[in-house]
Amino acid sequence: MNNMLTAKEIRQSFLDYFKSKNHQIVPSAPMVIKDDPTLMFTNAGMNPWKGIILGNHPVKYNRVADSQKCLRVSGKHNDLEEVGHDTYHHTMFEMLGNWSFGDYFKQDAIDFAWEYIVNVLKIDPKNLYATVFEGSQADGLARDDEAAAIWRKHLPDDHIINGNRHDNFWEMGDTGPCGPCSEIHVDSRSENEKAQVPGRELVNKDHPQVIEIWNIVFMQYNRKADGSLEPLAMKVIDTGMGFERLVRTIQGKQSNYDTDVFQPMLKRIAQVCNAQCKLPNAEGKIEYGKDENTDIAMRVIADHIRTIAFAITDGQLPSNEKAGYVIRRILRRAVRYGYTFLGQRDAFLYQLVPQLIDDMGEAYPELKKQEAQITPVIRAEEEAFLRTLDKGITLLDKLMEDARKDGKTEISGVDVFTLKDTYGFPLDLTELILRENHMTTNEDEYNKALAHQKQMARDANKQDLGDWTVLVDDTQCTMQNETEFVGYDQLECEAHIIKYRQVSQKGRDFYQVVFDKTPFYAEMGGEVGDTGELRMQNAECKMQNAECRMQNAECKMQNAKCKMQNASR
Ligand code: SER
């Protein structure tokens, strides 16, 4: 095993190897997806190639390799909750991939992978295992004997393991390109541990030291909406190697965070956070590897700053909906861990951007180009959320303290609801803090408070409509039952009321009035209604959205002759 290679060298060596095998090296596609309703973020290296794989786009190069920015935080592939707590899941990660579009297939794909990791990276073959698809009755597919036969050239039989449809038939989603796959797993345990339990028994068993590093997919089908498989016109090789895991293997580390992918960032986090830490006796306290909670928080931050910065670079600002909300939540998760475990009361994440550029800016030059945009966006988001956190955490601490005084481990669901509804304190954070304090909340109470609030909102929007009082016979209308719109040439006119009615909403009364003619354009088809004034004997009314608000107006509408003045145009 070559311990000398740095992360940057490993990334480059992958691209150099496939370049030497006549692959076109292409830059990463954006991590944020704007034109696919089924996907918000690139969650696999193959996403940008979907159109080519399905035959909808022409093939430009039939051999390609790249290092793709991926994000797994929503939908089918979602690792968010593990991130920071374990040492090998990430939100954003890099996927090294090589593709063949109608060129080589199983034989070369497996041989290239083997040559690269064994001959170039010098991973000891006795620590390697390959999985092959065992077949599926449901799909009418046989075992992948062809892949198994190729692996037999490289590995002994007991290092080749059958895998089921879940692990060895890769699908992009419920529909779309798919096919059987072979994964390469590496056993990084000590010799002693290996002697006790053979690695083959730990493959795909979530053992932190026996992990998958490379997935080689033999794309052959398109999964249709009815569940059937349609053969693709062109066979495709799609491979994905988790860069952070590969670096960890090559550098002989137990955790992805112990590699030089994350170490410089963890050191920078310690510097920045120590300098503004508000924990008691804080000096120099923040150091990776000394305390479990500090380590988790530092890993969360080291991971999340990549996602946040790259998402903004790719054009996804934090916001209150869809992809923007996913990014906002990730940013808030990082701020929250910094706040609670690293004593951060002031914005700190934005100060990590220069380090990220040092670490990743060479491979992803867009990061440096966007630095002036990324930094203030992160800072403003942090500051806004810190204000909310301060208030919410103080309230939640008090609630937990009161419960403890009463000998309880549960706090009221109504209080949790108020924290969210009134103070904007995120529910998932309340739940997390309660879990960490070995407390719970009453979910029934919470749900009742939520239902009550929804009902109130519905009631608030409910209108009580009075009957129309029709005045048309008493007026000198120019038109019957229809309002003449004169606003194209006039902003002011005299008019007569045709009918009116009282409307009660949110405990207040006002009137809707229909005139024979009006210079007010009503709200229609997305346009905002005009505003202005209506004057009549004894009363002056404000017209809003072309609707007359006459609260407390003592106005007799019988025979009312009005002067209307449009103030909006
Ligand atoms: N599509 C496969 C994966 O994401 C290989 O790239 O694992």
Image (cartoon, rainbow, N blue to C red):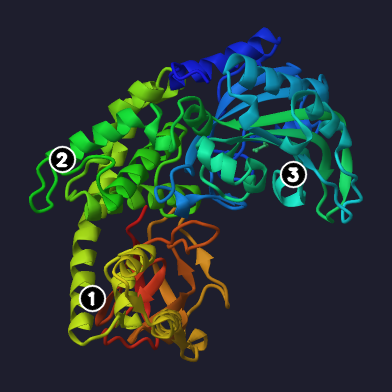
Residue 139 lies, in percent from the top left, at: 87, 52
Give how far apart the Cα atoms at labels 3 and 1 are.
Answer: 47 Å
* Mark 1, residue position: 400
Residue that appears at 68% across and 35% down = 129
Label 3, label 2: how far apart the Cα atoms are: 46 Å
**Residue 447, numbered circle:** none
Q: Secondary structure at mark 1?
A: helix
Tag 2 and tag 1, C-beta contact below 8 Å:
no
Answer yes or no: disc 3 within 8 Å of ligand 1: no
Q: Are marks 3 and 1 in contact (CB under 8 Å)?
A: no
Q: Label 2 to label 1, Cα distance in Å?
A: 28 Å
Residue 526 locus on image (x, y percent): 51, 57
Q: Is 534 left, or right, of 325 in this rendering?
A: left
How dense is the environment of label 3, judged by Cα within 10 Å: few (below 14), some, or many (20 and up)? many
The answer to whether marks 3 and 2 mark residues whose Cβ atoms lie closer than 8 Å is no
Q: Residues within 10 Å of mark 2 (few under 14, many from 20)?
A: many
Q: Nearer the viewer, residue 162 or 6?
A: 162
Return the residue nearer the eye: 530 or 448.
Answer: 448
Residue ID for mark 2: 274
The amino acid at mark 1 is Met
Q: Upstream in the sequence, badge 3 or badge 1?
A: 3
Q: Is residue 219 above or below residue 493?
A: above
489 is higher (above) or lower (below) than 515: above
Q: Residues within 10 Å of mark 1 (few under 14, many from 20)?
A: many
Which amino acid, by three-letter code, is at mark 2?
Answer: Asn
**Identity of the residue drawn at 57% across and 18% down:** 121
- The residue indicated by pointer 3 is 168
Front residue of 444/423: it is 444
340 shown above or below 253: below
Query: CB of residue at label 2: within 8 Å of ligand 1?
Result: no
Q: Earlier in the sequence, mark 2 or mark 1?
A: 2
